[in-house]
Amino acid sequence: MSILVTIPDPLAEKVTQAAKSQGKSPEDVVLEAVAGRLDPFARVHKLMTPVYDRMKELGITEDEAVEDFEAEKHAMRRERRAADQ
């Protein structure tokens, strides 16, 4: 399916610059931007896939992972405070 969209020159220049800096085509940059706008959580899902895969390997739930993370965060804070004293 094709949809023709006219992009104003200032925005087209930004697309072109983004494409160059990312090593992509302007079309890819526009398609990614549109897809990201339509599914704003796609980026989060992509980033979290390795985490969810590891949780599955370990046989833990998301709640258990969060509890472990919180415990580790608090332990690190205690260590940092002890070192500062």
Image (cartoon, rainbow, N blue to C red):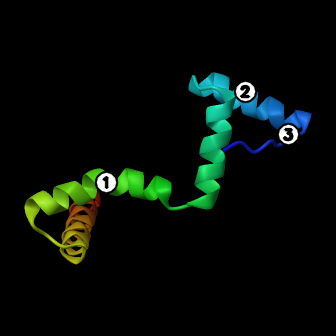
47 lies above or below 15: below
| Element on which disc 3 rests | loop
Identify the residue at the far right of this view: 9
* Residue depicted at 44% across the width and 57% down the height: 44
Which badge, 3 or 2, is on the more N-terminal residue? 3
Q: Which residue is labeled 1 in the image?
A: 49
Looking at the image, which residue is at 66% across and 44% down? 1
Quadrant location of residue 22? top right
The total number of labels drawn is 3
The 10 Å Cα crowd at callout 1, few under 14, some 14 to 19, many 20 or more, is few
Picture coordinates of residue 54, whole percent (x, y): 18, 55
Secondary-structure class at tag 1: helix
Within 10 Å of disc 2 (Cα), the crowding (few <14, some 14-19, many 20+) is some
Residue type for callout 2: Gln
Which mark identifies residue 17? Answer: 2
- Residue 68 in picture, x, y percent from top left: 18, 69
From mark 1 to mark 2, how far is it between C-alphas? Answer: 30 Å
Q: Name which residue type carries label 3.
A: Ile
Comes first in the chain, label 1 or label 2: 2
Q: Residue under circle 3?
A: 7
Q: Position of residue 32 (x, y in %)?
A: 60, 43
**Residue 79 found in image quarter:** bottom left
